[in-house]
Image (cartoon, grey):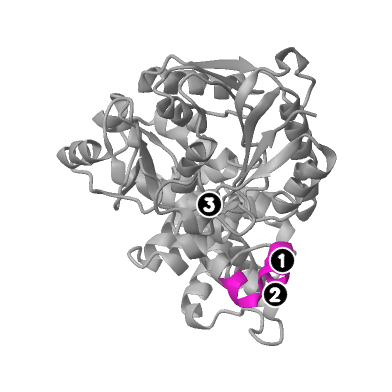
């Protein structure tokens, strides 16, 4: 069952995150599926997305006709089986092959099933001597294939960070991501929440940097099944993202705008820090995301967040000079959260970085227009890309003489000072800090 759900999910993949969203829909259509089967299906989908570049390279070496001629559904069957053969020690190779053959037969093509059986069994026999690119003579290609990253990204990180650091970053991006939650401080404390989780049989531990953060240890299944979740005692949110609301440090009575609110991870955290007083305008272009945000605020017991469907790329002059604090967590390349979203490796192109930088620049410019004098704006990305981070800061300062950069060192929570560099930027890296790669810069608007 798990393999079939994983296959259906992968067959639906096209846009970023689509496979995971499809899997959630499939779970809702199969409510009797136990937690182990759900977890296995998720592991299969994430694994194939994470390692697809390596999987496809290997398959290409064994196919005797043009790779592009393989039926897409059959190709996903091969990928699923090969992922199990190479990465899942607890799954017998014979089981992976037999299930792939069964899935292929369901397509009504017995001759294709023979092909699938033959190629997978050959790979099993030669598993210890697979034909990768030469490690020394073709170092870049080897790195791209073996660690399953697009060549453009391998070259970019090697050029910007050096070969050794780039390799550490590639490895970190292939780690299974931690499950991290944020305590809803309006309803409980971190220690009380840890105790509540223990009562439900869930092991958790306080994270190193985010004051409200808890890492769930060896957690499997759906978080929404937990009583503590249903009671609104926490929100799922990565550790680096949790630090960001502290960097903006809103006052209890401030009027705040979250310009790209999404499902409200940062909006709800800001509301907690403000004691659910003041007002937070949560803007987003997607009605579906805003509905999700409203559901989250209801579950968490918050009344200070007001969702608004709006495109901050368009003129928003009706809000001019309204806000004391603005959060801008705009669309970015997501290169800092590849472990959580491995399909980023498959869907993002190098040209996307320049395109997204232009989007970010427009959002920041519009946001400056509606920021009060002496108000503050926090710019956040979940990427490791100078074009979207440091260069974006330079561009904003160069084109807006009424905006100045603020040092974030006085703003970070206790124990986080080392996460701020000499320029006053908040920067985290998966291979150094064991959490998502984030960047943040704080601006203050002064009188022109």
Say which quadrant the C terminus sits in: top right
Q: Secondary structure at mark 1?
A: helix
307 or 270: which is nearer to us? Answer: 270
- Upstream in the sequence, badge 3 or badge 1? 3
Query: Do the numbered discs 1 and 2 sit on residues whose CB atoms are within 8 Å?
Result: yes
Q: Residue at x 55, y 51 (%)?
A: 337
Please rate how many residues cluster around mark 2, counting C-alpha atoms within 10 Å: few if below 14, some from 14 to 19, many from 20: many
Residue 94 in the image: x percent, y percent? 39, 66
- Residue range corresponding to the magenta coloring: 152-167
129 horizontally vs 185: left or right:
right
Pointer 1: what residue? 151
Pointer 2: what residue? 141
10 horizontally vs 186: left or right:
right
Say which quadrant the N terminus sits in: top left
Does 216 sit above or below residue 141?
Answer: above
The CA span between labels 3 and 1 is 31 Å
Q: Nearer the viewer, mark 3 or mark 1?
A: 1
């Amino acid at each position: 069952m798990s393999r079939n759900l994983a296959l259906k999910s992968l067959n639906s993949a096209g846009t970023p995150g689509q496979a995971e969203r499809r899997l959630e829909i499939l779970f809702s259509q199969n409510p009797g599926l136990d937690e182990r089967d759900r977890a296995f299906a998720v592991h299969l989908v994430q694994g194939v997305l994470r390692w697809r570049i390596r999987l496809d390279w290997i398959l290409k070496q064994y196919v005797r006709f043009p790779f592009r001629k393989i039926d897409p559904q059959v190709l996903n069957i091969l990928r699923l089986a090969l992922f199990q053969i190479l990465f899942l020690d607890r799954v017998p190779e014979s089981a992976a092959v037999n299930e792939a053959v069964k899935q292929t037969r369901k397509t009504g093509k017995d001759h294709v099933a023979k092909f699938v059986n033959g190629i997978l069994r050959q790979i099993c026999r030669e598993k210890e001597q697979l034909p990768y690119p030469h490690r020394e003579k073709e170092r870049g290609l080897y790195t791209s294939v073996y660690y399953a990253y697009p060549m453009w990204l391998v070259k970019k990180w090697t050029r910007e960070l050096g070969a050794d650091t780039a390799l550490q970053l590639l490895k970190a991006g292939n780690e299974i991501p931690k499950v991290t939650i944020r305590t809803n401080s309006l309803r409980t404390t971190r220690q009380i929440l840890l105790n509540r989780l223990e009562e439900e049989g869930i092991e958790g531990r306080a994270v190193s940097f985010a004051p409200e953060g808890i890492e769930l240890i060896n957690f499997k299944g759906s978080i929404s099944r937990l009583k503590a979740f249903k009671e609104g005692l926490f929100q799922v949110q990565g550790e680096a993202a949790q630090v960001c609301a502290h960097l903006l440090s809103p006052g209890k009575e401030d009027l705040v705008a979250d310009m790209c609110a999404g499902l409200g991870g940062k909006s709800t955290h800001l509301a907690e820090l403000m004691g659910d007083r003041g007002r937070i305008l949560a803007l987003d272009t997607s009605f579906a995301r805003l509905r999700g945000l409203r559901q989250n605020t209801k579950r968490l017991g918050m009344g200070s967040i007001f969702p608004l469907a709006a495109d901050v790329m368009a003129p928003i002059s009706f809000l001019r000079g309204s806000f004391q604090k603005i959060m801008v967590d705009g669309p970015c390349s997501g290169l800092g959260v590849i472990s959580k979203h491995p399909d980023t490796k498959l869907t993002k192109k190098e040209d996307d970085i320049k395109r997204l930088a232009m989007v970010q620049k427009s959002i920041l410019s519009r946001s400056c227009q509606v920021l009060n004098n002496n108000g503050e704006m926090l710019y956040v990305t979940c990427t490791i890309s100078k074009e979207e981070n440091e260069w974006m800061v330079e561009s904003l300062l160069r084109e807006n003489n009424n905006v100045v950069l603020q040092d974030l060192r006085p703003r970070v929570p206790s124990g986080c000072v080392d996460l701020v560099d000499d320029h006053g930027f908040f920067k985290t890296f998966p291979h150094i800090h064991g959490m998502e790669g984030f960047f943040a810069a704080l601006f203050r608007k002064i009188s022109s």
